[in-house]
Amino acid sequence: MNCTKCKTKAVIDLPRHNAAFCTPCFTTYVHEQTAYAIKHQRMFGPEDRILVAVSGGKDSLALWDILLKLGYKADALYVDLGIPGYSAKSREKVERFTERVARPHGATLQIHTVQEEEGAGIKELSNLVHRPTCATCGTIKRYQFNKAAVEQEYDVMATGHNLDDEAARLLGNVLHWQEEYLDKQSPILPASVEGFAKKVKPLYRLAERELAAYAVLNKIDYIVEECPMAKGSMMLLYKEALNRLETESPGTKHRFYFGFLDKQALRQGSGQAGATAPQSMAEKDRASLHPCSTCGQPTTGAICSYCKMMARSRLSSSSARRPS
């Protein structure tokens, strides 16, 4: 198998593109796909300050690596969830990458420790508030990433969601007909109201397998294991189903997700009944969102979900300590 571009020996084949690449050409392919996504979606410019949400996994570290190599000003934030046997290892991967790759580019790493800031590890918190661990984790991460981006005046927050992630999310939203989520499922979520950071997904054109190969070929040391708290996640089930379809028909994920984006753009631009134009979505957000009475971040209720969760956690913790 030879490289499609330079005809030397290939190290990876991409059936969905009917192509194969050697290491240098594959690295160029990944960089070009990311650069195209950034430009096509108008995610950010060369002078913008970017905050990358990193976890220690291949996708977020690959994203940070790519943005720095493309010449962007990208710092990162890591949220230490305090998961025994997992968080310490993932944090070590992030800190090692920072020293080896990011710091020479002038980039910095911030760390938010849940145990210190929220008063308990993620598992204990989920037990205190009687919510699934993944839901508790999602609430904390969304809140802290947005808070850091807004307070430190970053122009945009970037996450490492890839094609597999977006296709699986789309499948779940379609199966449950979650129209509000479908309207907002996009590689870019603008800062529709004050207090919300602009959020982008520069890796949406790249498959999970491609990013794993990029990490290995570019010597990015990442945590391979899935988060133990994600066991039984429906997202993993959706990914497994899509992987089976992809094996039988290469390009299935690409056609599914990009077909949705094409239809979404056509619908939003055509003025058809039921369409939601970007400006009307922003207007809808401005009409329904207002500052949380506790922390000031935008929310639909009087108090945001994060502050409600933390209040419930403190109440449960004090009740548990109270003598019977």
Image: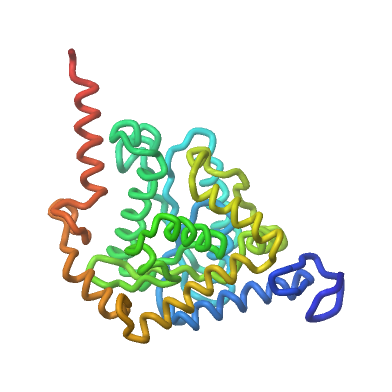
Asked whether the viewer can see residue 203, the reply is no
Q: Residue at x 52, y 69 (%)?
A: 257
Q: Residue at x 35, y 55 (%)?
A: 142
Q: Is residue 195 left or right of residue 91?
A: left
| Residue furthest to the front | 273
Q: Is residue 172 left or right of residue 309?
A: right
From the viewer's side, name the closer residue of 205 and 220. Answer: 205
User: Where is the N terminus found, in terms of image quarters?
Assistant: bottom right
Q: Residue at x 69, y 66 (%)?
A: 250
Q: Position of residue 255 (x, y in %)?
A: 58, 71
From the viewer's side, name the closer residue of 100 and 229. Answer: 229
Q: Position of residue 174 (x, y in %)?
A: 44, 60
Q: Is residue 273 left or right of residue 297?
A: right
Is 303 situated above or below 277? above
User: Where is the C terminus found, in terms of image quarters?
Assistant: top left
Asked whether the viewer can see residue 120, the reply is yes
Q: How is the image coloured?
A: rainbow
- Kindly indicate the quadrant of the structure image that contains residue 25: bottom right
| Residue furthest to the top | 324
| Residue furthest to the bottom | 270
Is 316 situated above or below 237? above
Is 105 situated above or below 209? below
Is 295 situated above or below 255? above
From the viewer's side, name the closer residue of 55 and 186. Answer: 186
Q: Is residue 216 left or right of residue 180?
A: right
Q: Position of residue 185 (x, y in %)?
A: 41, 67
Q: Position of residue 35 (x, y in %)?
A: 55, 79
Total residue callouts: 0
